Image: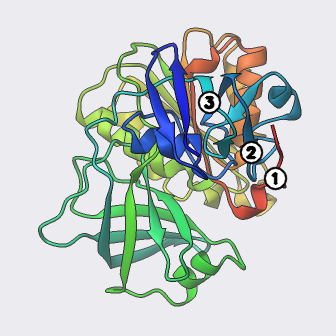
Amino acid sequence: MPYKVEIQPSGHSFTVPEGETVLQAALDAGFHLPYGCRNGACGSCKGKLLSGEVVLGKHSEHALSPDELAAGYTLFCSAKPLSDLVIEARSIGAVKDIVVKKLPCRVHRIEKPVEDVAILHLKLPANERLQFLAGQYIEFLLKDGSRRSFSMANAPHDDEFLELHIRHVPGGGFTDHVFTAMKERDILRFEGPLGNFFLREDSAKPIVFVASGTGFAPIKSILASAFHRGIAREMVLYWGGRRPRDLYMADLPRRWEREHPNFRFVPVVSDALPEDGWTGRTGFVHRAVMDDYADLSGHQVYACGAPIVVESARRDFTHERGLPLDEFFADSFTTAADLATPAAG
């Protein structure tokens, strides 16, 4: 049977059909709750269950710990109601005019700046353009019914091609195909734009961006859009990788640093080898932020990349550097391996 969900503090309500998740029903009803991966792995949709009962599907303990579950929190992307609910969640208005579409696209160009990263440039049909917010992602619709999510790296104003940064995961069906068989002029289908990882422009706070690996892609989109529109907020990007080559487009933020006085770039390498000749910052990327900032209470943070990087930043910035939890925005690049077994709550 369907159940009613009331959102606090807004007082809005919607109905969840039987077998549907809270998040999907909210989106279908036009209420844009925060979300990221939609598969229980990133924690962006976490919110409090004020009353009622849900059952949770697969989710990662990084996204929802047992302590948080015991404290009444849940993941709306995985939660299916067992009764009427009252939930506590922020509603986001910036995406209300964005239309989610299913479209074909053609592979226009494939670049490989390093051996394990491919940059795809995708061309839409001649009469189509994808309206999106910088930082959002698309999901490829594969023939077997599965989906693969990738963030757009181009800014919305630069929309002749969609640009995606794809890291090769050996044994991953889709990325194996990208690196071994995909060719120019191949046709793909996708749904998008999706996600709530975008710049909150109702704030004047300085911004710290934290990227690991191809987590640079949506941050590239956000920064390029911000520069294009003349946003004057203080912005700094910490981009981390194991080896210098993992910072596969480092020349671009270095150029931005020269061109924009309100922007700084801090590359961080954790496992440089002697032959790399690396003389820059070393260690974990989120620790570099903590070394530079004793107090983040007056900042916003946007973090993107590997789940362990995002979760470590969320935990340490909020617990040790005073960052308000509602000023931490994240897009965690997750795979099926990041998910735990189903749990009830």
At label 1, the amino acid type is Pro
Residue in the picture at 63% in, 14% down: 324
Residue beneath label 3, please?
84
Rendering coords of residue 40 (x, y %): 68, 48
The spot of residue 21 in percent (x, y) is: 59, 46
Disc 2: which residue: 56
Q: As rendered, which of 291 and 9 lies closer to the eye? A: 9
Residue contact at pointers 2 and 1, CB within 8 angstroms: yes
Residue 130: image quadrant is bottom left
Residue position for label 1: 342
Label 2 – label 3 distance at C-alpha = 15 Å
Colouring chosen for the image of the structure: rainbow
Residue placed most toward the observer, 200 or 256: 200
Disc 2 element:
strand
Closer-to-camera residue (146/154):
146
Name the spot of residue 165 as percent of width and height, x first. 49, 62
Q: Residue at x 83, y 35 (%)?
A: 65
Q: Residue at x 31, y 86 (%)?
A: 185
Q: Amino acid at mark 2?
A: Leu
